[in-house]
Image (cartoon, grey):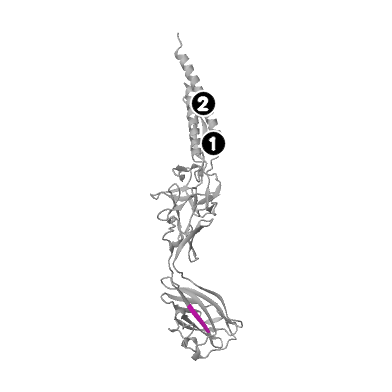
Amino acid sequence: MSMMGTAVSGMLADTNWLSTISQNVSNSNTTGYKNVETEFATVVDQVGSSADALGGVSTTVRSLNSLQGNVVGTTTTTDLAVQGDGYFVVSDSSGALYLTRNGSFVPDANGDLVNSAGYYLMGYDLKNGASAATSNSLSGMVKINTVSAGEEATPTTTGTLSMNLPSTATAVAAADLPSTNSATSQYTDETSLTVYDDLGGAETLNIYTTKTAANTWEIDVYDAADAAAGGGFPYSAGPLATQTLTFSATSGALTGGSTLSIPVPGGQTMSLDLSDTTQLASAFAVNASSANGNAPSSLTGVTISPDGTLDFSYSNGETSAGYQIPLATVASEDNLTTISGDAYQANQNSGTIRVGTAGSDGLGTIQSSSLEDSTVDLATELTQMIEAQSAYQANSKVFQTGADLLDILNNLKS
């Protein structure tokens, strides 16, 4: 009977081995799948006639989650692969969090990124100021709504204008300054700046700089839409802003009038920084010119960096950071609990989940337009299948021999 019991444990163990082989073969094309293996251990029957009586074999199934699969390129930007240590943090429809290496994410009807197993990608919403460095919890699902998403109009509120005004210029009489808005108005130099109103409409501001006296200038800002036919003076409305600039006679640095407040037509009051403007003995030059704000535009695509930063690209050529996709890991990856859909859950043996930025603190990097292949090697699995089948057959022969011996004993006659 001991012989038959041992053989039965061997057949059960080989059945478990064949089961893991079957699991691996069936998932040989599953994105991010990590193959499993059956580990064998001897069983000692402590209840037998001797303390070291053999009792057969037992098995343990272990997932080889720490293996790295081959990373292959795709044509979909939101296909993601992890190169190195780490897992994507995903959630199911109920909000429960899991880990996975299956990065085949595409937007669903709501724009939420979901993989082929139905798990939603989680991340930090950078548009609202969240990040791994500032938040202890993930902001929510990563959303890319290609139908309605776009960059909203933002009115201009600040700007910078850095110029050099020629100190050798001739002063203009007070009666002919641009601020008089007359047909005879004269100026030393002119530039322009594009700003945006409350609805995102682009407005062009004509900016005139005019020398009025030694080390003293006047700056006037007009709405270009009010210019006379053919451009220039007189404008149909007076200047939006007028201010006096004063400069140091020795260094040429600006000493007065460093900030100019400009009411943008149909928009906000803009604060224009002029602090880097100089008056030197050289030609007029604009060194820097910029203003915040933007026109509304539609979303044209996304890019995802190795550190997990997802940037939105818009039809107006602008880009903005949308989300940060983190990676997570545990102390013992091979002890994670396997969940349907190529996902994992932390437990006491695996250790708690640590979330961080890809490419830092030992975490791998994220590769966009890529997927991680299954780690299953079919040649190895088929070879092991033959070995498992042979072992099962051998154990069945032992069982059959024990049954024959038992039959002989039962037929003994006194």
Residue at (55% x, 33% y) in the render: 384
Main SS of residues in magenta: strand
Q: Is residue 23 magenta?
A: no
Mark with earlier residue (1, 2):
1
Q: In the image, what residue type sits under mark 1?
A: Glu
* Circle number at residue 381: 1
* Residue at the extreme right of the image, as rendered: 281
Residue at (47% x, 29% y) in the render: 12
Image position, residue 68 (x, y; %): 55, 45
Q: In the image, what residue type sits under mark 2?
A: Gln
Image position, residue 404 (x, y; %): 48, 17
* Residue at the extreme front of the image, as rendered: 230
Tag 2 secondary structure: helix
Closer to us: 311 or 52: 311
> Magenta segment range?
205-209
Tag 1 secondary structure: helix
Give the position of the C terminus as an image quadrant: top left
Q: How crowded is mark 2: few (under 14 residues within 10 Å), some or many (20 or more)?
A: some
Q: Residues within 10 Å of mark 1 (few under 14, many from 20)?
A: many
Residue 239, compared with residue 321, is above or below; it is below
Closer to us: 393 or 4: 393
- For marks 1 and 2, give the CA distance: 18 Å
Residue 376, compared with residue 204, is above or below; it is above
Work out whether residue 401 can be spotted.
yes
* Circle number at residue 393: 2
Q: Quadrant of residue 249?
A: bottom right
* Circle number at residue 404: none
